[in-house]
Image (cartoon, helix red, strand yellow):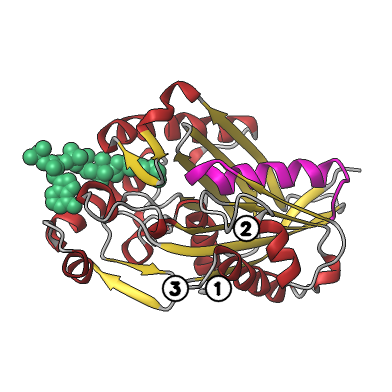
Amino acid sequence: MTLRAVIAGTGGYLPARVLSNDGLAEAYGLDTSDAWIVERTGIRQRHMVADGETVSDMAAEAARKALAQAGSEVAEVDAVILATATPDAVFPSTATRVQAKLGITRGYSFDISAACTGFIYALGVADAMVRAGQARGVLVIGAEAFTRLLDWTDRTTCVLFGDGAGAVFLRASDVAGQRGILSTHLHSDGRHGDILQVEQGLFRMAGREVFRHAVSKLASAVDEALAANALKQEDVHWLVPHQANLRIIEAMGRKLGLPPERVVVTVDRHANTSAASIPLALAEATRDGRIGEGDLVLMEAIGGGLTWGAALARF
Ligand code: UT7
């Protein structure tokens, strides 16, 4: 019997406060412009957590929506796996807080730290657990409050990020079929840790260096994912990439030969929400009817570590 982890539901949560590029520049006295930010990144606005709003609050809200869409009850949840670089506390884990907020009193929960690649890592771990029979219902969440890490005097980084949470509910299926996570491909290379890191509590990035790694490493990760499943570029219905920069997203779409309307883009409205960006994009594109049952979806991300990876799923 082959167990597969089927993405049964998705959900997203964005904080109420929205800041446009101009609004951000004005609020923080930044020497930047809407034109520069849009041209270099595609970002037009971002959401920001409210004072007192926590990552576990956002994550729990996204998880509730994913469970509802899956037609599932919390009793079906065996595990909560949450990717974040901005946990509520060192411990207890943010995942255990989400577990408590959802009223789940059984199973197990833990956080994953892989920065912007966190959701792909969490999906990889969850998929392996489902295949191994260690869980039949898994909430996989990416949730971040990156705006709490930003240096508001550094215009090269503080314009790039936003806050939010996204979740998927994975349900084990032993029906022989094509649906579910087909494979995940995880990578890291700690030699490049210093080009994207939190130093004395503040986010630092050598943007151009990261950009260079992104283009080559993401391309090889998606090639690897397709080859592992004997699939071709033209088999992919949707690219749901990590949302860091529209130029990187468009380059990946072109590499896969996908028309722009087959690439899910949220970076214009969400900015970079780190581990939350892919599940937020999945939630948007499944709810508005773009991604439907049977569609082959390719996900990819790169982030601090360096970490990077790709995942292929049939919805
Ligand atoms: O999510 C994790 C993965 N992260 C990524 O994938 C991010 C990858 N990197 C990037 O997306 C881009 O490198 C950035 C968006 C961060 C920067 O874009 P860039 O085209 O690489 O710009 P740059 O860093 O080469 O800067 C170009 C110029 C510089 O001025 P000089 O030195 O040429 O005079 C910067 O000082 O733009 C200047 N600049 C700005 N100007 C106005 C940098 N930030 C700003 C700003 N407003 N906010």
Name the residue tied to disc 3. 51
Q: Residue 198 or 42: which is nearer the viewer?
A: 198
Residue 176 image offset from top left, x and y in percent: 84, 49
Q: Give the quarter of the figure containing the N terminus.
A: top right
The amino acid on which the numbered mark 2 sits, given as a three-letter code, is Ile
Q: Which residue is found at the position 32% from the left and 39% from the top? A: 205
Residue 257 visible at all: no
Q: Quadrant of residue 187?
A: top right
Do the numbered discs 1 and 2 sit on residues whose CB atoms are within 8 Å?
Answer: no
Residue 111 image offset from top left, x and y in percent: 66, 49
Q: Give the quarter of the figure containing the C terminus.
A: bottom right
Q: CA distance from mark 2 to mark 3?
A: 22 Å
- Counting residues from the N terminus, which is met first, the one under dot 1 or under dot 2? 2
- Counting residues from the N terminus, which is met first, the one under dot 1 or under dot 3? 3
Residue 312 placement, left or right of 181: left
Asked if the magenta segment contains residue 133, the reply would be yes
The amino acid on which the numbered mark 3 sits, given as a three-letter code, is Asp
Name the residue tied to disc 1. 287
Q: Which residue is found at the position 44% from the left and 70% from the top? A: 49
Q: CA distance from mark 1 to mark 3?
A: 29 Å
Overall secondary structure of the magenta stretch?
A: helix
Magenta segment boundaries in residue numbering = 113-136
Do the numbered discs 1 and 3 sit on residues whose CB atoms are within 8 Å?
Answer: no
Residue located farthest toward the top when viewing the structure as drawn: 191
Q: Nearer the viewer, mark 2 or mark 3?
A: 3
Q: Is residue 284 above or below residue 259?
A: below
- Residue 141: assigned label: 2
